[in-house]
Image: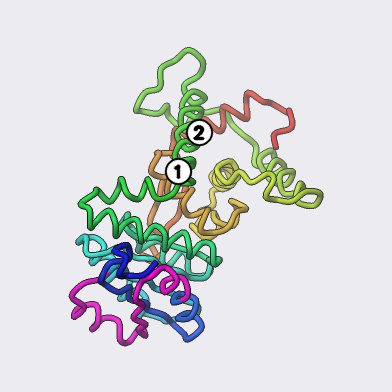
Amino acid sequence: MTASDGIAGPHPILIIASSDAARRRAREPVEAGGFRAVPLTFDEAPARLELQPGLSAIWIEVDESVEEQLDALLDLVQADVRAGRCPAVVSAPLELVDRIEAQLREPGTDLLIDATPSDRAVALARLVTWTVAKNAGVNDDVSRDSSDARLRQLSDEISRIAATLARLSTGPGQIPVEKPEPAGEAPPVSLETVRQVIRARRLRARYFDEEIFADPAWDMLLDLLQAEIAQHRVPVSSLCIAAAVPATTALRWIKSMTDAGLFKRRADPHDGRRVFVELAPQTSDAMRRYFKEVGKAAVV
């Protein structure tokens, strides 16, 4: 497929990379997808973004510290995405996820963490779909949904989890209401009980392939309940690790669980570049009622 086929379109993808190795990683899928890649350094990027007449996308590939340049660049890119100029992809290592995720609030931005070639290929496919939809005048939200069947499945699963937790939080035979019950009415759960469940889940990896039991939603719910009981705050990076799936997958689950009202995001009052995640009140209530109902039965 080439740009002349009408899929990639006439405009280039700007690749803004922190090193030569990062530039190569980003260029390979972009050029294989038929786009014209324009590689830039972080120093060159601001002026080029201002002058470039048209873009298919912006791709930022980070593999080393770029200090305050990264914050300023992300602000510029988010402004372009917000204005509908083009979508963006940001690929970075896990140690930067808190710093970057706190800034990326536009739905037209894909965040890849410790990305594999497959992750980059999926991100490129989403860019192609976005470009086709834009050229055809199709709504971006619709095009993004249709571009990836896995995201539709994730959405269905989130809806199922939300419905289940809503039933648990209100009890049998009751109708869910917008206003959750006061936190004090939720049954108490011991910190040690939750920790034992988490330990038991981790032990399975000693005997079986961890992918067999991948359940990021439940792993994150348990981790956030444990943190709530212990009165600890959980940054996005820690929750990604607790999910026991690739970080990019975990980020999509976090976003979907937040959009569904199961999680809440809270800005770090001491560091604007970090966000904490916590259970929404009704989710906390449902988890506590669940543990009360199962009692001392093995919960894995």
Residue 40 belongs to the span the image colors magenta: yes
Residue 72 belongs to the span the image colors magenta: no
What residue occupies the far top of the structure in this picture?
173
Q: Point out residue 51 in the picture as x, y percentages from the top left corner.
A: 18, 80
Residue visible at 62% across and 53% down?
244
Q: Secondary structure at mark 2?
A: helix
* Residue density around tag 2, few if under 14, some if 14–19, many if 20 or more, within 10 Å: some
Q: Quadrant of residue 258?
A: top left
Which corner quadrant holds the C terminus? top right
Q: Nearer the viewer, residue 47 or 99?
A: 47
The coloring applied to the image is rainbow
Q: Which residues are magenta?
A: 28-55
In the drawing, what numbered circle is on residue 257? 1
Counting residues from the N terminus, which is met first, the one under dot 2 or under dot 1? Answer: 2
Residue visible at 49% across and 26% down?
169
Q: Nearer the viewer, residue 97 or 51?
A: 51
In the drawing, what numbered circle is on residue 161? 2
- Dot 1 amino acid type: Met
* Residue density around tag 1, few if under 14, some if 14–19, many if 20 or more, within 10 Å: many
Q: Point out residue 133 in the picture as x, y percentages from the top left corner.
A: 27, 53
Q: Point out residue 240 in the picture as x, y percentages from the top left corner.
A: 55, 56
Give above or below for 237 relative to 38.
Answer: above
Cα distance, mark 2 to mark 1?
9 Å
Q: Nearer the viewer, residue 165 or 139?
A: 139
Give above or below for 174 relative to 106.
Answer: above
Labels 2 and 1 touching (C-beta < 8 A): yes
What residue occupies the far front of the structure in this picture?
5
- Dot 2 amino acid type: Ile
Q: Secondary structure at mark 1?
A: helix
